[in-house]
Every structure is written in C-alpha cells, then in structure tokens.
C-alpha cells in the first residue's frame, strides 16, 4: 500500500535475471589468435534450436544467437528502459565458442581437448560481457561463466573477471550425466577467493534433459524442465551442510530462475535434518552428526545471511508467501528477453505480484535486495528511474480481473498463469 505522499514517486526496478550474449561471429574477435583458426569451421556446424522461435520477432523471443535485444547494447537499453527497468543482472543468452549447439551457459567438458576449447570460448564470452556492461556504467551486472575442472584455472579466471569489472560468477549447469558437487575440499580456494573479493556465486535454472534426443521420447523435455530445478536447488544443502558458509561468512550466493516457493520447505527440511542429527545414538546422528557438530547455527540461519533468491517472473503466490521465503532475500527478475519473461507486460507483472503490498517491502524485492547483493548505486539508478520508472501508485494497484494478459495469446509468462480468485 502507498501513502498519498508516496503515490507520485517513481520506483527503481532492478531485474535480477536478464540474459545477453554476442552473436555467433561476434565472439570471434575475443578469442586468442590461435583459437580463431578453426572458429569458422566450428561456427559452420553450430545449430541454434532457438532460431525458429526468434523468427517471430527479432526484438522479443528466446535465446537465438542473432537476437538484437541480446547483443545490441543500444537497442537493448532502449527496450529495457521502455519496460521501466533501470538496472539488470545479466546471465548468458548465447553459446560461447566451441560449446555444444543449443547450450546457453556452462556445460561440463569431459575431455582435455574439449575443456581447452570451451575454456577459450568461456573466456571470450566473459570478456565480451565485461565490455557490454561497461557500455552503461552502473546499470548492468554481468555474471561471468566458470568451469570447476581445474581449480587453478578457475581461480585465475575469477581474478581476471574482477579486473575486468565483473563481480559475479555462474557455476556450471547440471544434468544427470554431469552433476557438480559443491562440497569437495578442492573447491575451498574458490569459496575463499569469492568471499575475499566480494564475488557473488550463482546457480541458475537449466534443463536437465535434452528434448531433442529421439530415444528419450516425447517426455524428455517436460521431465528435464522438472528435474532441472532439482539439480540446481540441491547445491544449497552442499553449501550449508558442508560448512562453506560457516567457514566463509562473507560469501554470497544467489539461486536464480529456480522459483521461490520451494525455499520454505527446503530450508525447514535442512533444519529438521540438523536437529535430528544432534540426537545421540540416532540413525540421523550416525549419518549426519559429524557434519552438524561443525555447524553452530541452524541451516535456516545461514540461508538468512548468505543466500538470495532471484525470483524470475515472480508469481502472486510467491508474493503472498514472501515472509516464509524472506522479504530481504527475494529479488524480482524479468528474464528479458526470453519469451516466458515479463516483457512487454512488466508493469502488469509487477502489479500482479506487488499490488496491495506494503511499499517498503515492494521496494526491497524489486531493487533494495539486489542493490545490497550486487552493489548497485540506488542514487544513480533513481536518476534514471525518475525518467522511466513506474509510479509507486501504479505498482501498488492490483490488477483488475479484466486486466490480466491473456495466456498464451498475449503472454506465456508464468506470472500470469494462475490468476488469483478474488472475493
């Protein structure tokens, strides 16, 4: 709710989940010369399964390599400000050089030649991303990609991206054949370095199945989309129960585009396992006692100090459960330019979730929490918001029954899937 004195205020809106990436040949100049030799051969064999979706409208679609909104900095800024957003956190939107067709972000390499090629492509993407963010200082936070195969290489890349001006990293995507545990001792130097440098560690939603694999049948895509959330969420227990957050209290981690409704039950479940493992001579103590005795705090306490949730295309249900999730943990995200994102109905998406909520809570979830995590300058962003930001009175007004965008004719954004039933 807003007071009359706040009604005319224009709000800062930060999207904690946006995507950008160079065009297919746009990465070539960022590769070392010796890797450019066979780049054209790789590019000629690269297949982009998103193109058929993108062809509907080059300014709005999914993750096609030639998406104008994904790689054209000036055009993108026009689109995002037209959507009322003044700050964004940017995840990958196109495959780096030498990555498999259809992959948006880090996929685990399994052989040394594969690793070396993809590492070169990954570095090219990170360099491009830093330049892309520097086009609009203070308005874009780029999330660099890393591998975990060789920890020395990983540490070097983290230091390099910080020198380039980036402050965030994306852990490798996971599939059933490439699960990446986060608790092995060999990763300890990474957590220490990120904590020391203020680098935010991310897990981002991804599919765990390949819908284009014929032998898996028609169910592969839907099963992959369901299981992909499970693989990403599992990392939270790794970080908490192995004591990473206890040893590195300044380490910051965000789970983005994995939903938010899962958080209360997941965190409560960790607390339950923790308490059970403290019961002497119990089966739970046999399995979990050695770990929890090294944790002086409940898992939920580590969550409240070390973890944020990038609630992409946030739903009204998640807004209603904000106290259970944590008002100071939630960061709204638009998922621009993906077709399931809030664009071009972002104001309606904000009203669907935040209409009727206390203004200070809304401000925290649409800007304040992201500012705290990533270091956005709210005073700088407010100057832009004063020109393009939505009015507080607009965001505070719930959508009327006849204002909800039609699904799927007007939007395929999950925010609008389940219109609340009003008394």
Image: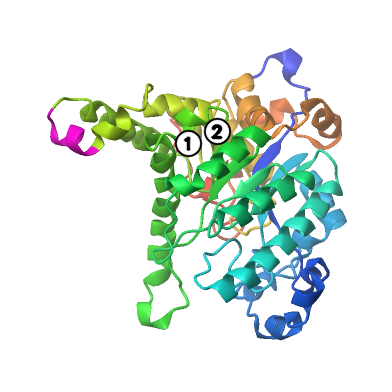
**Observer-nearest residue: 228 or 142?**
142
SS of the residue at dot 2? strand
27 to the left or right of 279: right
Closer to us: 188 or 357: 188
- Count how many numbered circles sit on residues in the image: 2
Mark drawn on residue 374? none
Taking the spot 65% from the left edge, 85% from the top edge, the residue there is 45
Q: Main secondary structure of the magenta part?
A: helix
In this image, 187 relative to 141: left or right?
left
The image quadrant that residue 284 belongs to is: top left
Residue stretch in magenta: 281-287
CB contact under 8 Å: marks 2 and 1: yes
Task: Point out residue 396 in the picture as x, y percentages from the top left corner.
Answer: 64, 27
Tell me if residue 401 can be seen.
no
Q: In terms of depth relative to the viewer, which is nearer, 419 or 49? A: 49
* Residue at mark 1: 318
Give the residue furthest to the left: 281
Which quadrant would residue 176 be assigned to in this image?
A: bottom left
Q: Quadrant of the N terminus?
A: top right
Could you tell me which residue is drawn at 58 percent across and 43 percent down?
A: 201
**Which quadrant of the rendered structure holds the C terminus?**
top left
Residue 240's x, y, as percent? 41, 35
Q: Position of residue 47 (x, y in %)?
A: 63, 80
State which mark lies toward you, 2 or 1.
2
Across and down, in percent, residue 67 comes to 74, 66
Nearest to N terminus: mark 2 or mark 1: 1
The residue that disc 2 covers is 330
């Amino acid at each position: 709710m807003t007071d009359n004195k706040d009604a005319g205020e224009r709000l800062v809106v930060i999207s904690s989940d946006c995507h950008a990436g160079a065009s297919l040949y746009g990465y070539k100049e960022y590769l070392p010369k010796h890797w450019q030799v066979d780049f054209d051969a790789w590019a000629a064999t690269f297949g982009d399964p998103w193109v058929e979706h993108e062809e509907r409208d080059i300014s709005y679609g999914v993750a096609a390599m030639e998406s104008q909104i994904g790689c054209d900095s000036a055009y993108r800024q026009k689109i995002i400000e037209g959507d009322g957003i003044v700050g964004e956190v940017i995840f990958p939107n196109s495959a780096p050089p030498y990555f498999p067709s259809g992959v948006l972000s880090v996929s685990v390499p399994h052989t040394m030649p594969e690793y070396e090629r993809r590492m070169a492509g990954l570095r090219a993407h990170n360099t491009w991303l830093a330049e892309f963010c520097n086009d609009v200082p203070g308005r874009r936070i780029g999330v660099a990609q890393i591998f975990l195969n060789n920890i020395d290489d990983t540490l070097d890349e983290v230091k390099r991206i910080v020198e380039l001006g980036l402050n965030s990293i994306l852990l490798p995507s996971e599939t059933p054949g490439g699960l990446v545990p986060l608790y092995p001792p060999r990763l300890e130097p990474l957590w220490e370095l990120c904590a020391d440098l203020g680098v935010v560690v991310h897990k981002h939603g991804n599919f765990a199945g390949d819908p284009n694999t014929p032998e898996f049948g028609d169910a592969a895509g839907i099963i992959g989309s369901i299981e992909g959330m499970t693989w990403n969420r599992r990392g939270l227990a790794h970080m908490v129960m192995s004591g990473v957050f206890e040893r590195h209290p300044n380490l910051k981690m965000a789970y983005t585009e994995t939903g938010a409704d899962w958080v209360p039950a997941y965190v409560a479940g960790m607390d339950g396992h923790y308490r059970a493992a403290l019961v002497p001579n119990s089966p739970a103590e046999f399995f979990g006692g050695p770990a929890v005795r090294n944790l002086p705090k409940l898992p939920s306490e580590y969550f409240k100090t070390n973890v944020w949730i990038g609630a992409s295309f946030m739903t009204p249900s998640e807004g209603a459960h904000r106290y259970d999730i944590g008002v100071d943990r939630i960061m709204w995200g638009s998922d621009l330019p993906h077709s399931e994102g809030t664009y071009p109905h972002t104001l309606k998406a904000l009203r669907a979730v935040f209409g009727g909520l206390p203004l200070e809570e809304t401000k925290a979830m649409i800007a304040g929490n992201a500012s705290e995590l990533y270091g956005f300058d709210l005073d700088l962003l407010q100057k832009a918001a004063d020109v393009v930001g939505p009015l507080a009175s607009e965001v505070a007004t719930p959508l009327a029954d006849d204002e909800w965008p039609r699904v799927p004719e007007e939007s395929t954004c999950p925010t609008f899937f389940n219109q609340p039933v009003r008394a």
